[in-house]
Image (cartoon, rainbow, N blue to C red):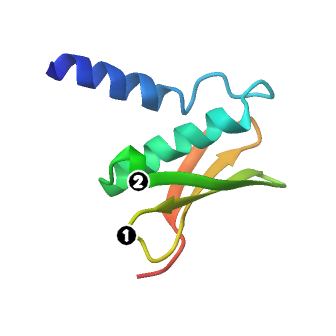
Amino acid sequence: MKQAILIVVGATLSACTQGGGQGSSETDLQGSCEALVSAETGVQAADVNAVSTESVSTGTITTIEVAGAQAPWLCLADATGVIIGVEYSQEG
């Protein structure tokens, strides 16, 4: 059972860097961002939701709502679609 869980988590997180490029869809990117924020916060995936993705000169910024958080999380991806980090949008 433990091995099956690790395989699922590994496959989910590997989607964060696979493919990249122009072929990655916004939905795939949002799903990867949700998985990373869920892992970072310890909040179950059902309570982590991407609400928007904005194109910026360096790539994209996806806004993620997390149950119980006072402010959204941000997921930053480069121009090729590779996620470069997640961060809480409120200092503290």
Q: Position of residue 75 (x, y in %)?
A: 58, 53
**What residue is shown at x 47% (from left), y 80% (from top)?**
91
Q: Nearest the camera: 14 or 44?
A: 44
Query: Which residue type does callout 1 highlight?
Result: Gly
Q: Position of residue 33 (x, y in %)?
A: 54, 45
Q: Residue at x 53, y 27 (%)?
A: 15
Check the image and report above or below for 36 versus 28.
Answer: below
Q: CA distance from mark 1 to mark 2?
A: 9 Å
What residue sits right under mark 2 in the picture? 47
Q: Secondary structure at mark 1?
A: loop
Quadrant that contains the C terminus: bottom left
Q: Quadrant of the N terminus?
A: top left
Q: Is residue 26 left or right of residue 41?
A: right
Instruction: Decide if residue 6 is on the left or right side of residue 41.
Output: left
Closer to us: 28 or 88: 28
Residue 39, label in figure: none
Farthest right residue in view: 57
What amino acid type should be assigned to the residue bearing mark 2? Asp
Seen as rendered, the residue at the extreme front is 46
Q: Residues within 10 Å of mark 1 (few under 14, many from 20)?
A: few
Residue linked to disc 1? 68
